[in-house]
Amino acid sequence: MKKLWIITFGECFRLNRLKEACEKRNVELEVIKTYNVHITNNQVISDGKKINFKKGDIVWTISNNAAAHHLIRYLTARFKKEIKFIWTNTGAINYADKFYGNSFFTSMNIPTPKTVFINTFKDYKLDNLAKYVGGFSCVVKANIGSMGNGVEIVSSTSDVKEFIKKKMEAQVDVPFRRSSFILQEFIKESAGTDFRVLVLRGKILGGIRRKSVNGDFRANVSLGGKAEIVEVDKEMKKMAKKIMKEGDIFYAGIDFIKSKRGYLALEINTSAQFKGFEKATGVNVAGKIVDALMENV
């Protein structure tokens, strides 16, 4: 019997739901926590035990942190003959990077907010970068982040520098960082509302509209936003399917906002949370994911 391995940063709603789904389906599950492993050049030790993969074992990750990226790349290189499945395409981990994802949208002619990579601290250069995205006020984002963390509206170059300074000074429990940042066009008419389309193996599971209830321009459920089921119209459906197909992505939440010029693709969340989605739609996302993973056996 083949085993399902899930890579995660720690206990969370998703992991608990996936555990429940595996138990109901008689699927043997092992959990690898990214900050509890020792990665050497020829083995991975988790909770004091060497990990032994059997040929055809399935490995999936619900973590986008830096440790997970290193671990996934290592597993792909070291155990590619044993492991049956990682993500679908290990290159999909790159979509967790917001600038990479935005560039990917542009390469497919999918509408997306104007975005520029921050590569300077000089005021006059930051001013020029801001002008490219429509000027201040605009949005600054850490390229790697989730659940609305690392996203703010900025009104000046000093705001940008202060945001980056705080992020760089933030304490971390691992001895490496992948810190980079972008400026993005602020779509005023969309503030406080966004849409998430959840897609699994090219099939759309449904869509939700997320709304802020506290005046925050971010609508994330993790920040107090409320989710409600919404019909995925032809425009969003077409873009979501194209993104998943071109990216060879197994599972993702594609986020959109509505602007005066139509829907704009915002992010690809390849380890998308689904607590708010399950509650709003009644769709058993965890079960569908486990079923899809085990179809590869």
Image (cartoon, helix red, strand yellow):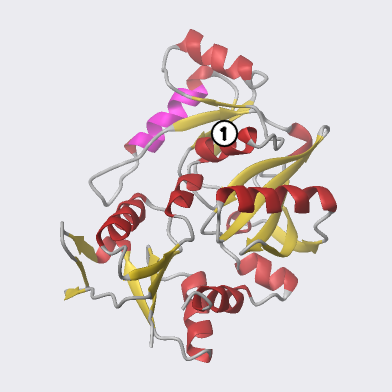
Can the viewer see residue 257 in this picture? yes
**Residue drawn 46% across and 61% down?**
87
Q: Give residue 228's position: percent from left, percent from top.
A: 77, 63
Residue beneath the point at 26% across and 43% down: 176
Residue 214 seen by the camera: no
Q: Position of residue 114 (x, y in %)?
A: 65, 27
Task: State which quadrant residue 249 falls in.
Answer: bottom right
Residue at 69% of width from left, 53% of height from top? 241
Q: Find residue 122 and report its horizontal and vertical position in percent.
A: 43, 12
Q: Residue at x 68, y 42 (%)?
A: 265
* Quarter residue 110 falls in: top right
Name the amino acid, label 1: Ser
Q: Is residue 288 left or right of residue 18?
A: right
- Determine if the magenta segment contains residue 61: no
Residue segment shown in magenta: 159-168
Q: Is residue 116 above or below residue 142?
A: above
Q: Which residue is mark 1?
A: 103
Magenta segment main secondary structure: helix
| Residue 63 horizontal/vertical position (percent) | 43, 59
User: Is residue 166 highlighted in magenta?
Assistant: yes
Pick the quarter of the image with the N terminus: bottom left
